[in-house]
């Protein structure tokens, strides 16, 4: 490369010509270029306008604007980007300092490819004191190069350097502003999703999790967000039935219809939670295809339990009314049967049937009749107890004393073998307004069931503690547990898992009625093979 040299006379003549013929056009070129760059805020637009201005305002064959900025990268005029030989530009820029001037008849060294020119002039761009690019101009012949032409190119170069520098700063500021706005929007969206009182996550077509809100992280079924985002949903939800989960997602992607599914989960402590899970497909605005599926899980345990409680109360009331009428009708025939059996037994004792060969059989049969009559009498008594209104005498009582008394009675019954009792009473327990005898009856019934569930021995625990405005009494065993399919039926009258003749199925129903009439609540949590815990919640006495 070399810089063109002109003699003093030639330079003087060129200057006179410029003043006489080109002075006004030069000012017009510079002013119009300055106006066009005044409101140009994109670096590539600056490059295009400068290159177009030089091509149309100066006698040149080709022009390419090229610069390398750290914040943006390579900048060229859009129309001539394909003409730039980038490797030549990078080699030129790597020289320290880069050569300035023009190359003549060395097409292989030209930065512009296919420009149809024989000479190439390079005018360097100085941005923030550093050479970061150049305006490369191609001439058809050396005769086209004059001091006026070079002066215009240099002026355009200086204006371009200032404009691209300003536009680069603006572009960087806009880029940072957009990124900041996107980050703020993303944070706001995440905050909204985290604030929702539901568990929510989103998967894409590859079943990868892209969103996982805070409520999906908490609870027994929760999984930390950083362990879920980006992973396959079937790997993350490995505790759930894989076939069912996959079928639900495939159906949502295939049909594009919203689906609501009721589910139940059992926590480690045996408590059951009820969920309403919604699968909501998301469609692309362009293609209309389902791209993501939103899964929303809402905890509806309280609502389901409330509905079950209402249904249970209505069923208990109806059965109670039926039992009250039936018991009186059955008790009289049972009393007659029992009286007749006892009368015949008395006659046998008096020797009325000594001569009969069937006297022994008669004695056995009468014993069976009397025994079964009294067992029926026990059932009708339980029915009558179940059906009657349990008003009782409600006074402030110490729940801890009731628990200790019930545990003491159970220990003296000598029921079961190898049963270890544990009693835990919270100090300073507040009183409850209750009929102490009825609450004790309920605790004993629960403890009796617990002992029956531990035929091989185990631990029977009694606990009493305060929780908010309630006192909680728990009876826990380490027995066989209750199967999940039986959990919703255990408080129903006549439902029992015991062998025939071992239970009437009214014990838990009576307990439920007692606690409900005290304004309390009876709940259960159980794990098969680990044990069962019944919890009585009683309101604290206001007196």
Image (spheres, rainbow, N blue to C red):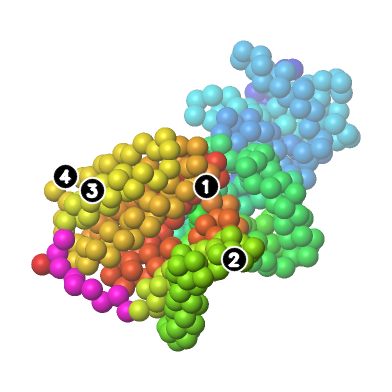
Question: Mark 4, mark 3: which one is toward the viewer?
Answer: 3
The range drawn in magenta is 389-397
Question: Mark 2, mark 4: which one is toward the viewer?
Answer: 2
Location of residue 153 (image quadrant): top right
Q: Look at the image and tell me whether residue 185 can be seen.
A: no
Which is more toward the observer, 125 or 366? Answer: 366
Question: Mark 2, mark 1: which one is toward the viewer?
Answer: 2
Disc marking residue 415: none
Q: Is residue 301 above or below residue 202?
A: below
Q: Marks 3 and 2, how far apart in space?
A: 58 Å
Residue 146 in picture, x, y percent from top left: 72, 32
User: What's the residue at 55%, 41% (across, down)?
Assistant: 529
Of callouts 1 and 3, the N-terminal one: 3
Callout 2 secondary element:
loop
Q: Marks 2 and 4, how far apart in space?
A: 71 Å
Q: Is residue 68 above or below residue 295?
A: above
Taking the image as shown, residue 86 lies to the left or right of residue 337, namely: right
The residue indicated by pointer 3 is 404
The residue indicated by pointer 4 is 427
Question: Mark 3, mark 2: which one is toward the viewer?
Answer: 2
Taking the image as shown, residue 376 lies to the left or right of residue 439, namely: right
The residue indicated by pointer 2 is 355
Disc marking residue 481: 1
Of callouts 4 and 3, the N-terminal one: 3
Mark 3, Cα crowd under 10 Å, few <14 / some 14-19 / many 20+, is some
Callout 4 secondary element:
loop
Question: Mark 4, mark 1: which one is toward the viewer?
Answer: 1
């Amino acid at each position: 490369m070399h810089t063109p040299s002109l003699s003093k006379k030639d330079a003087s003549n060129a200057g006179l010509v410029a003043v006489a013929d080109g002075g006004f056009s030069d000012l017009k070129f510079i002013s119009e270029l300055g106006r066009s760059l005044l409101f140009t805020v994109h670096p590539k637009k600056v490059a295009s306008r400068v290159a177009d201005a030089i091509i149309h305002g100066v006698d040149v064959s080709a022009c390419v604007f090229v610069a390398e900025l750290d914040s943006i990268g390579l900048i060229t005029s859009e129309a001539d980007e394909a003409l730039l030989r980038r490797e030549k530009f990078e080699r030129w820029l790597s020289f320290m300092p880069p050569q300035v001037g023009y190359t003549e008849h060395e097409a292989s060294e030209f930065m512009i490819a296919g420009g149809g020119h024989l000479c190439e002039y390079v005018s360097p761009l100085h941005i923030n004191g550093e050479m970061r690019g150049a305006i490369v101009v191609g001439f058809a012949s050396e005769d086209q190069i004059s001091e006026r032409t070079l002066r215009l190119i240099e002026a355009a170069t200086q204006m371009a350097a200032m404009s691209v520098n300003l536009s680069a700063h603006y572009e960087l500021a806009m880029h940072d502003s957009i990124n900041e706005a996107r980050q703020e929007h993303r944070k706001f969206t995440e905050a909204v999703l985290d604030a929702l009182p539901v568990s929510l996550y989103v998967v894409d077509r590859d079943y990868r999790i892209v969103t996982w809100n805070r409520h999906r992280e908490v609870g027994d079924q929760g999984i930390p967000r950083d362990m879920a985002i980006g992973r396959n949903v079937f790997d993350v939800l490995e505790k759930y039935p894989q076939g069912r989960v996959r079928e639900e997602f495939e159906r949502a992607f295939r049909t594009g219809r919203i689906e609501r599914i009721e589910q139940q989960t059992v926590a480690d402590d045996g408590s059951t939670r009820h969920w309403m899970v919604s699968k909501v497909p998301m469609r692309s605005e362009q293609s209309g295809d389902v791209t993501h599926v939103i899964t929303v899980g809402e905890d509806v345990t309280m609502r389901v339990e409330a509905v079950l409680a209402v249904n249970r109360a209505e069923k208990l009331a109806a059965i109670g009314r039926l039992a009250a009428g039936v018991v009186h009708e059955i008790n009289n025939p049972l009393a007659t049967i029992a009286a007749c059996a006892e009368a015949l037994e008395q006659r046998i004792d008096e020797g009325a049937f000594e001569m009969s060969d069937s006297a022994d059989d008669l004695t056995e049969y009468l014993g069976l009749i009397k025994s079964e009559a009294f067992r029926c009498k026990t059932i009708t008594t339980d029915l009558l107890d179940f059906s009657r209104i349990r008003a009782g005498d409600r006074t402030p009582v110490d729940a801890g004393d009731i628990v200790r008394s019930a545990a003491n009675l159970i220990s003296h019954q000598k029921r079961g073998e190898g049963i270890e009792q544990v009693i835990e009473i919270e100090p300073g327990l507040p009183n409850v307004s209750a009929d102490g005898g009825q609450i004790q009856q309920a605790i004993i019934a629960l403890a009796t069931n617990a002992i029956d569930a531990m035929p091989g021995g185990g631990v029977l625990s009694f606990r009493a503690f305060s929780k908010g405005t309630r006192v909680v009494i728990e009876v826990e065993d380490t027995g066989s547990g209750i199967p999940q399919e039986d959990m919703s039926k255990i408080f129903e009258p006549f439902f029992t898992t015991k062998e025939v003749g071992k239970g009437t199925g009214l014990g838990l129903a009576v307990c439920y009625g007692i606690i409900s009439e005290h304004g309390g609540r009876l709940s259960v949590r159980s794990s098969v093979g680990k044990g069962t815990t019944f919890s009585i919640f009683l309101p604290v006495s206001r007196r």
